[in-house]
């Protein structure tokens, strides 16, 4: 780290974030809504997926009765009807949602920790460490990730944990890039230089000075990433490498509905709507937080 | 990352000897950039092939067991894997394959008789290329005018509707979109075929590719419209040349399309270049749904057949495509903005 102290004087301004004074109080409630609406939808979805089945006698998602097969929407006791083997569709949506949210959380957490660390260390250490880590990342980026994911999913066998490991192949390089860019912008800021000059240890600079300033950007990114993860999880199900039947997941509900698409489009449409609403909410929340925290 | 800077070169003097012209060519920033980037791509591509070789090797089962099925006797399996050279150690097989690639030979498919990998890729690649190009054309034709309209009347009705559409189109899963399109266009009215059927007519060919291309294009339209709109609005609010143009009395439309839009193409190009890798990933899913016999379709087949040479070949093609797309993006910068040609090129 050879940074002349004079940098403190020359780079004294923290990236002037063009403060737009225009949208004043009148627009503030719109700004709040942009975060509140998707956050409420997500909290409701999480509540219905994780807590509702514990407090309300929701039918089981598997082992439905063959006497009540193919019930239409809004049937008594089965709001979304039943599927081709008599399982309650509503219940499969709820339990499938659990899978989607768990996979999204797991993949983003792994990406945030592993990728975030790689990017942070690469940016802070610079030099050879940076060059080597970035070349390895280049390989992962030039490599069609879907191949890696399919191969990992195929070799480990279909299960929820394995899907999480497989999809981390997407999230780790992505987080590493974002984290490296964020750390590079911060590295030469006056407060970091000051910390370095005052003799703080590298790990202390990284975790006490850099990480707190990078978190808003990484968290925003993880919202957008979570929406992508949920979509990709469905894609794995769709290609037959994801969550195996009879366990419910939105992806495999859509995939198995494909066979009956001309007769019963609802088997595809109902889970698709939930998938779409979840993805839109995550994207909106990410955008809203990005505007709120003023990160790029 | 170390950013090597190209020193500013004087333009090659006109009317010299051939040698001088060649020397001038060798100093051309574009050529130097291409040369450097292609050299830098070699270790990356090598890493990609090594990674896919290791991954394929880690998969349970091999080509012999995949092809003979579960009823094969151990003796048959053993004989067949010797025939396919699968009994040799990993490094020997990889070295053999790599030596072939360096001399321009991608090897032979294990699964489909003794067809060469190059000929398989030659058959499949045009399908995927047509799909990607068709999708990009749809994307640009829709998103550029849409973004201009949005930027002309920000917060207007078109702007709000298109932002709504963008959010939906970015969030929709490709397989969901594909199935919805099939419900609308194929189940009751047979406007487009839901499964690829070989034809020789141009119209039939375009009909085959239309739905898959729309699936690829829709998320891109949302993404590019948002991007272009933001870029145009930023320029219209803050740039000096916009103020100058307006002061000259140039009409607002003309300012938007001639002065602002041209500058936005540079950013758009970067985004397209970066997106290409993702786009390739999506083609695998789309080709599977619509049974398009493209390179992604072949890739899934090859993975399940454990046909390592074919997987390696396709992964190499994908890797080269990403590297070339990035290089082309950088070179086009210079065409779109002459200032960039002579400024130190940073990566």
Image (spheres, rainbow, N blue to C red):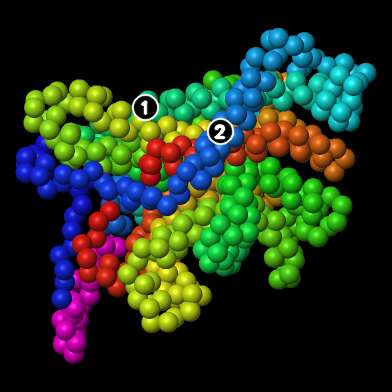
User: Crowding at label 2, few (<14), some or many (≥20) Cα neighbours within 10 Å?
Assistant: some
Location of residue B346 in the rendering, given as x and y in whole percent from the top left corner: 25, 56
The answer to which of A45 and A258 lies nearer the viewer is A45
Q: Which quadrant of the figure has residue B80? A: top right
Secondary element at tag 2: helix
Same-subunit check for callouts 1 and 2: yes
| Residue at left offset 47%, top offset 28% | A108
Cα separation between marks 1 and 2:
30 Å
Q: Hey, which residue is sitting farthest right in the picture? A: A67
Q: Which is closer to the viewer, label 1 or label 2? A: 2
How many numbered circles does the render carry? 2
The answer to which of A26 and A261 lies nearer the viewer is A26
Q: Is residue A196 left or right of residue A156?
A: left
The answer to which of B22 and A161 lies nearer the viewer is A161
Location of residue A57 in the rendering, given as x and y in whole percent from the top left corner: 77, 10
Q: Hey, which residue is sitting farthest front in the picture? A: A25
Q: Which residue is mark 2?
A: A36
- Chain letter for the residue marked with disc 2 in the picture: A
Q: Which quadrant of the figure has residue B264? A: bottom left
| Residue at left offset 46%, top offset 57% | B230
User: Crowding at label 1, few (<14), some or many (≥20) Cα neighbours within 10 Å?
Assistant: some
Location of residue A131 in the rendering, given as x and y in whole percent from the top left corner: 23, 41
> In the picture, which quadrant includes the N terminus of chain B?
top left
Q: Is residue B32 magenta?
A: yes
Q: Which residue is mark 1?
A: A114
- Is residue B13 depicted above or below B10 in this figure? below
N-terminal of the two: label 1 or label 2? 2
Is the magenta region chiefly helix, strand or loop?
helix
Instruction: Identify the magenta region.
Output: B11-35
């Amino acid at each position: 780290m050879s940074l002349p102290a004079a940098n403190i004087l020359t780079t004294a301004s923290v990236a002037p974030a063009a403060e737009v004074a225009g949208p004043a109080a009148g627009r503030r409630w719109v700004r709040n809504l942009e975060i509140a609406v998707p956050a409420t939808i997500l909290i409701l979805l999480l509540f219905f997926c994780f807590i509702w089945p514990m407090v309300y006698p929701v039918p089981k998602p598997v082992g439905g009765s063959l006497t009540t097969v193919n019930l239409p929407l809004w049937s008594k006791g089965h709001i979304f009807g039943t599927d081709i083997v008599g399982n309650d569709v509503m219940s499969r949506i709820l339990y499938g949602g659990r899978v989607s949210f768990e996979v999204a959380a797991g993949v983003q957490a792994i990406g945030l920790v592993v990728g975030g660390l790689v990017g942070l260390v690469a940016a802070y250490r610079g030099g050879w460490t940076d060059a080597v880590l970035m070349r390895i990342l280049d390989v992962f980026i030039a490599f069609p990730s879907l191949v890696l994911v399919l191969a990992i999913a195929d070799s480990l066998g279909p299960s929820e944990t394995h899907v999480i490991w497989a999809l981390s192949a997407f999230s780790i390089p992505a987080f590493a890039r974002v984290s490296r860019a964020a750390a590079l912008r911060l590295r030469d800021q006056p407060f970091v230089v000051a910390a370095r000059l005052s003799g703080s240890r590298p790990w202390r600079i990284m975790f006490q000075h850099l990480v707190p300033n990078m978190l808003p950007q990484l968290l925003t990114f993880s919202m957008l990433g979570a929406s992508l993860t949920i979509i990709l999880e469905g894609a794995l199900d769709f290609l037959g490498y994801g969550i195996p039947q009879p366990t419910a997941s939105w992806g495999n509900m859509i995939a198995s509905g494909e066979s009956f698409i001309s007769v019963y489009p609802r088997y595809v449409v109902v889970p698709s709507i939930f998938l779409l609403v979840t993805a839109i909410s995550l994207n909106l929340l990410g955008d809203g937080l990005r505007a709120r925290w003023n990160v790029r | 990352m170390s950013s090597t800077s190209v020193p500013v070169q004087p333009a090659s003097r006109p009317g010299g000897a051939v040698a001088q012209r060649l020397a001038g060519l060798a100093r051309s920033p574009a050529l130097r950039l291409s040369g450097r980037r292609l050299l830098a791509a070699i270790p990356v591509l090598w890493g990609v092939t090594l990674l896919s070789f290791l991954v394929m090797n880690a998969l349970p089962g091999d080509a012999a067991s995949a092809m003979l099925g579960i009823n094969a006797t151990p003796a048959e399996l053993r004989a067949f894997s010797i025939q396919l050279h699968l009994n040799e150690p990993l490094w020997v097989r990889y070295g053999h394959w790599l030596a072939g690639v360096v001399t321009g030979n991608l090897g032979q498919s294990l699964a489909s008789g003794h067809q060469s990998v190059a000929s398989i890729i030659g058959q499949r690649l045009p399908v995927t290329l047509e799909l990607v190009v068709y999708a990009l054309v749809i994307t640009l034709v829709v998103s550029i005018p849409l973004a201009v309209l949005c930027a002309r009347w920000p917060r207007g009705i078109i702007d709000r509707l298109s932002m709504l559409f963008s959010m939906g189109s970015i969030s929709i899963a490709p397989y969901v979109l594909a199935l919805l399109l099939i419900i609308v266009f194929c189940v009751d009215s047979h406007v487009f075929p839901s499964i690829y059927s070989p034809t020789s007519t141009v119209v039939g060919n375009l009909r085959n590719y239309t739905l898959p291309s729309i699936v690829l294009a829709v998320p891109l339209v949302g993404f590019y419209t948002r991007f272009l709109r933001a870029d145009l609005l930023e320029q219209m609010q803050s740039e000096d040349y916009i103020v100058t143009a307006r002061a000259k009395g140039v009409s607002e439309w003309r300012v938007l399309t001639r002065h602002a839009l041209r500058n936005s193409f540079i950013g758009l190009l970067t985004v397209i270049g970066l997106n290409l890798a993702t786009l390739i990933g999506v083609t695998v899913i789309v080709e599977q749904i619509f049974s398009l016999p493209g390179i992604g379709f072949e890739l899934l087949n090859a993975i399940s057949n454990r046909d390592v040479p074919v997987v390696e070949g396709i992964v190499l093609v994908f890797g080269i495509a990403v590297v070339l797309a990035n290089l082309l993006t950088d070179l086009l910068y210079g065409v779109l903005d002459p200032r960039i040609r002579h400024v130190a090129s940073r990566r």
